[in-house]
Amino acid sequence: MEDGARAAWAPPRAHFLIAGEGADRAAIRGAVARLPVDAYGQVFVEVASGIQVERWPTPASVSITWLFRDAAAARGNPVARGELIERAVTSWVAEWMPGKPSGREIPYVMWLGCASNARIDQLCERLAWSFDHVHLHDPRSSA
């Protein structure tokens, strides 16, 4: 890497995780549209089928993964609403968030949809209890 390129790189201001289901698409689309241009993170959207996929512009370092319940069912593994989001978020947390705070200065910012889903409610409770260095935006708590 050249010195100029190294000097131009800066760590992200926050690490974003946005996750929800088909009913949350408008809220997720809005959240993605408001991300800073230099945002870094992941978006998971669980939908019934591929016909619900939409193309959204994202910052260069943010990716969107669409999770299809019908594809899981076609493989002989039917899943309940919210199950794919729970798996994706749990895996993301296991990969990106160490069990102990690492002293890093970059905060984690999460928005989790799937309102009125007991599985996701429990996941939000576990995340809030386990990580004090996370900004967790839970739409269920802002009535």
Image (cartoon, rainbow, N blue to C red):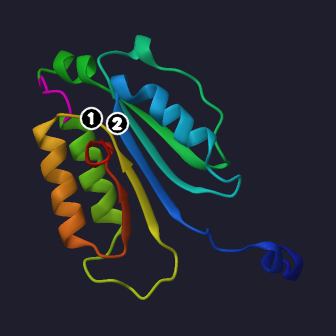
Q: Is residue 130 above or below residue 123?
A: below
Residue kind at label 2, given as amino acid type: Gly
Q: Which comes sooner in the sequence, label 2 or label 1? A: 2
The secondary element bearing badge 2 is classed as strand
Q: What stretch of residues is rendered in magenta? A: 77-82
> Residues under labels 2 and 1: Cα distance?
5 Å
The disc label shown at residue 114, or none: 1
- Can you say which quadrant of the picture contains the C terminus? top left
Let me know if residue 107 is in the magenta part: no
What residue lies at 16% left-to-right and 61% top-to-bottom?
126
Q: Is residue 100 above or below residue 125?
A: below
Query: Residue 59, percent across and down?
Result: 66, 47
- Prevailing secondary structure of the magenta residues: loop
| 73 left or right of 100 in image | left
Reading the image, the residue beneath label 2 is 20
Query: Residue 138, percent across and down?
Result: 31, 49
Q: Is residue 95 above or below residue 21?
A: below
| 89 left or right of 59 in image | left
Let me know if residue 79 is in the magenta part: yes
Quarter-wise, where is residue 40 in the image?
bottom right
Label 1 environment density (alpha carbons within 10 Å; few <14, some 14–19, many ≥20): many
Callout 2–callout 1 Cβ contact below 8 Å: yes
Residue kind at label 1, given as amino acid type: Cys
